[in-house]
Image: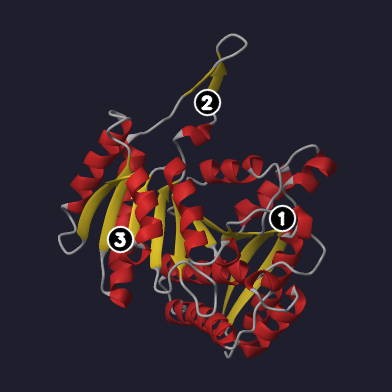
Amino acid sequence: MTRYSISLVNGDGIGPDLANSGTILLNKISDFSDIKFDIVGVEAGDNALAKYNKALPDFSFDIIKKSEVCLKAPVGEHAADVILVLRRYFDLYANIRPAKSYPNVKSLHPSVDLVIVRENTEDVYLGWEFPIGDDAVVGIRLTTAEASRKIAEYAFEEAVRRGVKNGQKKVVCVHKSNVMRLGDTMFSRISKDVAKKYPDVEFSESYVDACAMNLIRNPEKFDVILTTNLFGDILSDEAAQVVGGLGLAPAGNIGKKFAIFEPVHGAAFDIATKNIANPSSMFLSIKMMFEWLADKNKNNDQATLMDLGRKIENTLMSLLNENIKTIDMGGKMPTDDFTKTFVSRLVL
């Protein structure tokens, strides 16, 4: 029997609803398997700012530091003061955003299975903007060789991992080197250097505007998309919409020793407390968390954790096949009923 400590950011808006759904799922697994969880709630975001004058209070930061992994529900207007701080502190250099077609979900294409591997620590997200007089601003975009190499290596390793299941093993490096001739040319060059170490992985390149177009036109042709921070942020939301929307979109912020998993959509204040939020993205984020824990620990739990991840996704697919869906997906189930049904169908 193994115990894992999980810090759980409760978030804002629909965040507490999704955090509750995630907790119910984890408790079911903990009760009926040899994998146990110690879940510690974390205050962070708009509510924390109002209470403590800081979006990420020191005591919340300490809880996250002491945990083995973090699960994060959506945070409101001050999300950047939470997630960007955590990404930099833990060097969570890889943002991983899968986009996959699921049954009976209205989407633009029925056979998409791709992942966007996005550099997560630099680019314009450093917030280096400076005023020039009263009516102009200059922004600095940072691209380093070290970060470019790390994310390229992650992308190729991800293609190898996925190749075991889908047999594709393809990486496309997405950039805009014809305009950003120094930073993106370096990103492209380093990606090509890393590609030489993976001769079994098909490598190609694309300008970001062409990639955005082809994500609509031929999304099924993509496997692993390797790109920079800003481009990855935009393309991953586009990819999520192609397969049916953000309600099914999980994400991982991954470093060498720590990771944070989260639904990618916002706090959706307009539907907060209405019991209609879709918890599927939280369930799929937990699946990703199990896969990361399995890869990180490589202990006797590895096979069990991977199997738990598969069972979570299979349970979701089973419900969707039966048209058991939340309201945002065209179904009738409120959040709590969908969560109860999901957990009751999960066979451990």
Q: Residues within 10 Å of mark 1 (few under 14, many from 20)?
A: some
- Above or below residue 53? Residue 197 is below
Instruction: Answer yes or no: is residue 92 visible.
Output: no
335 vs 190, left or right, is: right
- Above or below residue 210? Residue 342 is below
User: What secondary structure is marked by label 3?
Assistant: helix
Q: Quadrant of the C terminus?
A: bottom right
Where on the picture, by quarter, is residue 202? bottom left
Indicate the amino acid at tag 2: Trp
How far apart are the two marked residues, 1 and 3, measured between alpha carbons? 34 Å
Query: Residue 143, percent across and down?
Result: 37, 33
Q: How many marks?
A: 3
Mark earlier in primary sequence (1, 3): 3
Q: Which mark is residue 268?
A: 1
How far apart are the two marked residues, 2 and 3, measured between alpha carbons? 31 Å
Residue occupying the point 45% across, 37% down? 122
Q: Residue furthest top?
A: 133
Residue occupying the point 51% across, 54% down? 237
User: What secondary structure is marked by label 2?
Assistant: loop
124 vs 319, left or right, is: left
Q: Residues within 10 Å of mark 2 (few under 14, many from 20)?
A: few
Mark earlier in primary sequence (2, 3): 2
- Above or below residue 339? Residue 154 is above
Q: Which residue is mark 3?
A: 157
User: What secondary structure is marked by label 1?
Assistant: loop
Where on the picture, by quarter, is residue 154? bottom left
Q: Nearer the viewer, residue 36 or 328?
A: 328
